[in-house]
Image (cartoon, helix red, strand yellow):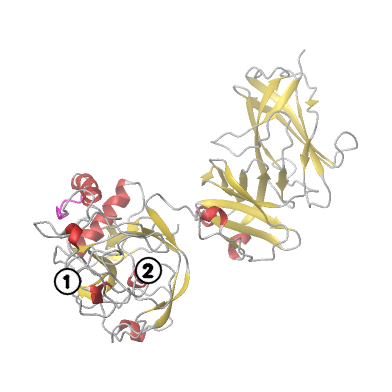
Amino acid sequence: MRALVPILYIRAAWICLAGGLLGMTRLLAQSSPSLLPLQFRVADSNGVAVADGVRTVTFRMYTNAVSGAASWVETHRDVGVRAGVAGVMLGSINGTITNLDFAEVQYLGIAVEPASGSGVAVEMVPRTVLLPTIRATVVERARSFPGGVIGTVELARATVPVAAMAPGTALGNLQGLPGDRLVSGAMAQNIFSKGYFGDGTVLVADSRTNGVLRAAGYVAVAEVPSTGIFLYEKRVVPPGFSLIPAGPFKMGVTSGDRDANAPSIDVTVSAFLMQTNEVTKAQWDAVRTWGLTNGFTDLNVGGGKAPNHPVQSVTWFDAIKWCNARSAKEGLEPVYTIGGVVMKTGTAAPDADWTANGYRLPTEAEWEKAARGGLVGQRFPWGDVISHTYANFYNAGTEPYQVGDAEFHPDYLGAPAPYTSPVGSFPVNGYGLADMSGNVWEWCWDWYGHAYYTQSRGSSDPRGPSSVTGRVLRGGSWGNDAFFSRCAFRDGYFPGDVDSLNGFRPARGLL
């Protein structure tokens, strides 16, 4: 009779181990208490999957690779095997997996009954080593599973040692993507079980809520000896978006400019996502077409010089409803509601659900932080001087910081107006955003208040005054001179009016 060989492998719909045939699989699990979902493939010595049926499977923890008594044993009877695949929840019988405190190397032995009902379980050789190496593993995606288990769907991109880290230590910029961080505190209190696998899979079981861990696009867990449990998050950045990092920045005038409505102040914003380009006419049309047959029946047709030019001649209300329509089209939570109902039509002032994961307009503070691209004390997203090399604007030649060709941008001066340029025609700023100066004005969420930022010094995530007349526009346009294209310039416009100078770009929260 050929020997049965438990092969540990990945299966997308579950959390499981991976390491190849009898490979050196790293598994770390928390003690007192701990539940560890495990899925594995059972095959004979030639790698052929065993017949469907039920088997008895015994799991043992050892301190020696080949001999000695087991420090922990759990036997699962009537384990179903289908197409060679079996799965169990370790710890569900004994209630705890002990002796995994990383004091020494340990080993996992898996014994599978050779034939259904034989009662004799044959243990795999060699045992799978359990190394006391603590690593935080970056994974592609997390999702919730029945029973409150959160696991991975795709394989890891990278592995980061964290054994020497103190609580709250930042991990730095892994693989060139911003926003990496190691988080401790309230989140950690919900974690009661976790597993780490050498191939990059991560398991977290949460007895109370999945929401905490599902907040991150990339999720991994690490336990640093003697310091407790930490949650490592790496945010997903969808295609076409940039991650704008959290933190304070200098908002308002710089370089001697003296706008009375834009004092130089410190403002803090949370991390968020911003579309790298202004919404194009093609983007607008695709969502609008879907929206017209799904309840969004009064979206303006909008203007656009070409499919790859920014949409313009859309109102603030159009932009709000388009964001909701795009969210609904993509299965996300719409942000804007009227009386608790998703806003699809009309011109009533909506409420914003800042916890929703759908598309929205940036706040004015978010817009300016994004526009500055990480630069401090500069007028524009790239520096202190503007020319047609950097942006599509009207060069009136009246400001000392304008240089180069005069009047409209010569490359886009073609009848009829508007003289927009294809999105992304100019260099991006430090956050990877294009056209934050010029091309079209961009609608923001806030009501426009002339003295708002004089009154809101040092605030975090400001969202504008409660109600005035106009909504904020930022960034200048193809038809405005350099003064209006500065990062600090603030303006407002009636939310129901259209203008060929006005467009927008959506933002999203990090959820």
Please state which amino acid type lies under the numbered disc 2. Trp
Q: Position of residue 28 (x, y in %)?
A: 72, 47
**In the image shown, does 69 or 162 lie closer to the viewer?**
162
Is 311 left, or right, of 100 in this rendering?
left
When the figure is inspected, residue 119 is found, relative to residue 457, above or below; the finding is above
**In the image shown, does 314 or 486 lie closer to the viewer?**
486
Q: Which mark is residue 382?
A: 2
When the figure is inspected, residue 410 is found, relative to residue 481, above or below; the finding is above
Identify the residue position indicated by label 1 in the image. 494
User: Which type of secondary structure does the marked residue at label 1 adopt?
Assistant: loop
Alpha carbon distance from label 1 to label 2: 30 Å
Q: Residue furthest front?
A: 404
Q: Residue at x 68, y 21 (%)?
A: 43
Is 303 left, or right, of 17 in this rendering?
left
Q: Residue at x 28, y 84 (%)?
A: 261
Is disc 1 surrounded by few (<14), some (14 to 19) or many (20+) residues within 10 Å?
A: some
State which quarter of the image contains the C terminus. bottom left
State which quarter of the image contains the N terminus. top right
**Magenta-drawn segment:** 295-303
User: Which type of secondary structure does the marked residue at label 2 adopt?
Assistant: loop
Please state which amino acid type lies under the numbered disc 1. Phe
Is disc 2 surrounded by few (<14), some (14 to 19) or many (20+) residues within 10 Å?
A: some
Q: Residue furthest left?
A: 416
Q: Position of residue 451 (x, y in %)?
A: 29, 85
When the figure is inspected, residue 387 is found, relative to residue 201, above or below; the finding is below
